[in-house]
């Protein structure tokens, strides 16, 4: 089990993760520039896939803390090595480390001007409170709870495969066209190191304990919208954009 304090003794400057233009089948006919969104949901709910689509629709950067940490692991830095211990054990990286990384990303020009979609952050009430204070007075426009039952996410996580290079998601039921080579960048498609049964169960337990309370927290702030995450990716995307646009319109934030 990793030690509790810090994954490397501080915030690593410039921890970023690039995603290739993936999911070319996604239909996003309309763009609505500018939004500040947080996406919540269990591991395996489809957040990664949907965030790529929402990022295109709202023309905002997709900020995935998991992708940022995986990029740090690949760089084989001291920070990456410590982060990997937490991740492979299914544990959360300490709040102060994650907050530092996200804060640094949110201070960059593109997010300040256009907004963002945050995927995997916040994951604790403390992270959410800190984020709201950092973004005051506007805060986030909406937090979306992407709802998928535990049985389904367990099935999805067991079959999930990911491109090591660009992060494109595949599954044993929807493989790349040529072996386990990414259709978009030619990278190796593998099972995530933290998609072992023990780590999955630990992450889902932590989700219930630490992250599920955020749903109530955002509800109390009148910032929550729940969206059914079952169905085809296209169905879920249109459900999401309809729900987000309606709520943003009500709050006078549209466009
Ligand atoms: P994900 O890809 O979102 O499932 O994240 C993979 C792993 O990165 C998690 O299991 C945690 O170990 C770590 N991680 C990502 N985001 C956070 C966060 N907001 N707080 C703490 N740990 C995080």
Image (cartoon, grey):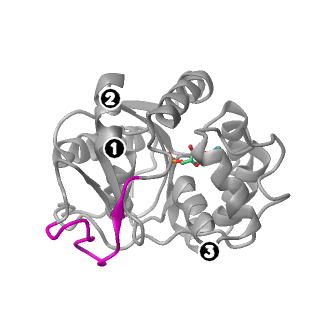
Query: Could you tell me if the residues under marks 1 and 3 are in contact, i.e. CB atoms within 8 Å?
Result: no
Residue 183 part of the magenta segment: yes
Query: Could you tell me if the residues under marks 2 and 1 are in contact, i.e. CB atoms within 8 Å?
Result: yes
Neighbourhood count class around disc 3 (C-alpha, 10 Å): few under 14, some 14–19, many 20 upward: few
Task: Report helix, strand or loop for mark 3.
Answer: helix
At 78% from the left and 61% from the top, the residue drawn is 11
Gap in angstroms between the C-alphas marked 2 and 1? 9 Å
Neighbourhood count class around disc 1 (C-alpha, 10 Å): few under 14, some 14–19, many 20 upward: many
Q: Kindly identify which residue carries mark 3.
A: 109
Q: Position of residue 129 (x, y in %)?
A: 71, 37
Query: Where on the picture, by quarter, is residue 212?
Result: top right
Task: Report helix, strand or loop for mark 1.
Answer: loop
Give the residues drawn in magenta, as a range.
177-191
Q: Kindly identify which residue carries mark 2.
A: 148
Task: Report helix, strand or loop for mark 2.
Answer: loop
Q: Position of residue 25 (x, y in %)?
A: 16, 63
Q: Going from the N terminus, do you reach mark 2 or mark 1 first?
A: 1
Question: How would you classify the magenta stretch by its main secondary structure?
Answer: loop
Q: Is residue 241 left or right of residue 95?
A: left
Residue 165 part of the magenta segment: no
Q: Going from the N terminus, do you reach mark 1 or mark 3 first?
A: 1
Relative vertical location of residue 55 with respect to residue 150 in this rendering, above or below: below
Q: Position of residue 241 (x, y in %)?
A: 29, 47
Q: Kindly identify which residue carries mark 1.
A: 46
Relative vertical location of residue 35 with respect to residue 231 in this rendering, above or below: below
At 63% from the left and 66% from the top, the residue drawn is 72
């Amino acid at each position: 089990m990793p030690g509790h304090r810090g994954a490397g003794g501080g915030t690593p400057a410039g921890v970023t993760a690039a995603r290739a233009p993936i999911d070319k089948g996604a239909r996003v006919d309309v763009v609505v520039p500018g939004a500040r969104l947080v996406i919540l949901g269990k591991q395996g709910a489809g957040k990664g896939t949907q965030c790529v689509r929402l990022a295109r629709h709202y023309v905002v950067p997709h900020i995935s803390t998991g992708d940022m940490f995986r990029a740090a692991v690949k760089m084989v830095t001291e920070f990456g090595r410590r982060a990997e211990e937490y991740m492979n054990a299914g544990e959360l990286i300490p709040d102060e480390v994650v907050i530092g990384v996200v804060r640094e990303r949110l201070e960059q020009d593109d997010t300040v001007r256009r907004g963002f979609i945050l995927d995997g952050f916040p994951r604790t009430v403390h992270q959410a409170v800190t984020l709201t204070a950092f973004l005051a007075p506007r805060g986030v426009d909406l937090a979306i709870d992407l709802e998928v039952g535990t049985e389904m996410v367990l099935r999805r996580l067991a079959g999930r495969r990911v491109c090591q290079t660009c992060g494109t998601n595949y599954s044993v039921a929807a493989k790349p066209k040529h072996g386990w080579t990414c259709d978009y960048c030619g990278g190796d498609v593998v099972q995530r190191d933290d998609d072992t049964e023990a780590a999955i169960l630990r992450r889902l337990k932590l989700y219930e304990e630490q992250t599920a309370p955020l749903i109530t927290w955002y509800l109390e702030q009148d910032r929550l919208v729940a969206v059914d995450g079952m169905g085809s990716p296209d169905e879920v995307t249109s459900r999401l954009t309809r729900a987000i646009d309606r709520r943003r319109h009500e709050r006078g934030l549209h466009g």
